[in-house]
Image (tube, grey):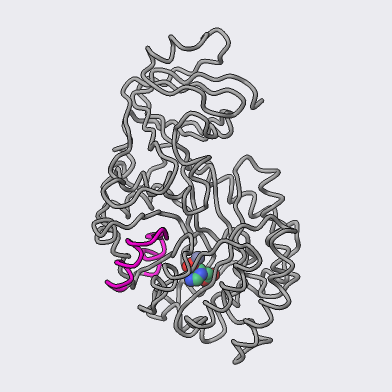
Amino acid sequence: MDDEKILIRNASQVVTCSGFEAKKGAAMSDVGVIEDGAVAVSGGLITHVGPTEEVMKQIDASEYLEVDASGRALLPGFVDSHTHFVFGGYREEEFSWRMKGDSYMSIMERGGGIVNTMNATRQASYDDLFGDAYDRLDTMMDMGVTTVEGKSGYGLDLATELIQLRIMKELNDEHPLDVVSTFLGAHAIPPEFAGRTDAYVDYIIEEVLPHIREEHSVTFCDVFCEQGVFSIEQSERLLNAARTHRFKLKLHADEIVSFGGAELAARLKAVSADHLLHISDNGIKRLARSGTIATLLPLTAFSLNEPYAPGRQMIDAGCAVALASDLNPGSCFSCSIPLLFALACIQMKLSPEEALTALTINGAAALGRAKKIGSIDVGKKADMILLKFPSYKFLPYHVGMNLVDTVIKDGVLYIV
Ligand SMILES: N=CN[C@@H](CCC(=O)O)C(=O)O
Ligand SMILES: [Zn+2]
């Protein structure tokens, strides 16, 4: 199927988000709109982009399956660069407790939270974990996601971490979406290491990390760097060890308190620092001067009823900002791109252009893939979406509604 030639023509807008690396600060506003545009695809890759009239002159249209995109905008597929979509069980009770005033961390300190999901994940069958994760990818794809990152971190022992990572590798092969895997063994301290966080970090470094990267095509290593979870020193020790095994680095940083996680991410030249609800002014400056992407997760702030990360301030300071869902069974049981887009614009004060950049080329850069995905550029994967409306500006305006009409993944059309 993916060697079929496709011509999408007369799109009211082709919004290219053109680029091959992360966009920082003011550059995030440049999304590149072609009115009455066309894109030609061959072998799953983009071969021509431009005004319909010009593209028609460059190709033999009779060789192509033609899609008349009149009245619809064509955009790059969304890149959801931070999720925890492989897990067992649910935590609806904890959500009710939080609504009555319990905090996320107090539930975690009582032995709930991530360890609750760890128990359910250790007990779940491979087939159930796989099937539920597959269904979640279907849901994401319906909302226009074409590449997703997924983290382990609900096994917290070698065997179960490997199961999560194996499932993501298989899903990358079997599901149309591309799945990028992250090892997050340092997500919480499992009961068998209670009160011995340093010993757990030693265990990950000595007995888990060496078995992960090659065997399971895992790109990133991440850590929940947070007061009461993994300290700055423990996070640094673990991430330095991960680097020796050729992992690229990510951090959950400054989510609950201002902790210096953003500064650590910049110092370690991590690919991204994620969450950042409580980033310090110094942290913003350090990220702006670095190549580290600030990945913001407004659905989590919304679900936890916490203040949003200062996205406006970060972009004004010159940071490269990405947006992602953070789908997980605890702090944010949602992968809703429509709600995410609305929150980013309405609550975090990003413009529609900045939010679109953050969910496309900057999301791709947060996965180290900006040369291959994240924009409509010749030579990139044909990962695109057609909206039901003529302009990308409908994305935050038609609040919380799924506007995706068609997903084009690797040059194959999927009608939503
Ligand atoms: N904060 C740490 N990790 C996840 C939540 C995981 C969970 O609660 O299960 C996050 O990114 O929000
Ligand atoms: Zn997370």
Q: Is residue 27 above or below residue 133?
A: above
Query: Picture coordinates of residue 412 (x, y %)?
Result: 59, 29
Query: Does the stretch in magenta take in 293?
Result: yes
Q: Nearer the viewer, residue 210 or 52?
A: 210
Q: Quadrant of residue 120?
A: bottom right
Left or right, residue 240 beside residue 394 = right
Query: Picture coordinates of residue 55 (x, y %)?
Result: 43, 15
- Residue 116 visible at all: yes
Magenta span: helix, strand or loop, mainly? helix
Q: Is residue 185 above or below residue 129?
A: below
Query: Picture coordinates of residue 85 (x, y %)?
Result: 58, 58
Q: At x 32% / y 50%, what residue is drawn?
A: 342
Q: How many marks?
A: 0
Q: Quadrant of residue 49?
A: top left
Left or right, residue 335 beside residue 134 = left
Q: At x 64% / y 83%, what residue is drawn?
A: 200
Query: Picture coordinates of residue 370 (x, y %)?
Result: 48, 45
Query: Does the stretch in magenta take in 227?
Result: no
The magenta-colored residue range is 280-304
Q: Is residue 400 above or below residue 240?
A: above
Quadrant of the frame with the N terminus: top right
Q: Quadrant of residue 292?
A: bottom left
Q: Nearer the viewer, residue 174 or 2?
A: 2
Q: Is residue 262 above or below residue 175?
A: below
Q: At x 55% / y 34%, what residue is drawn?
A: 381
Q: Nearer the viewer, residue 273 or 156?
A: 273
- Residue 416 visible at all: no
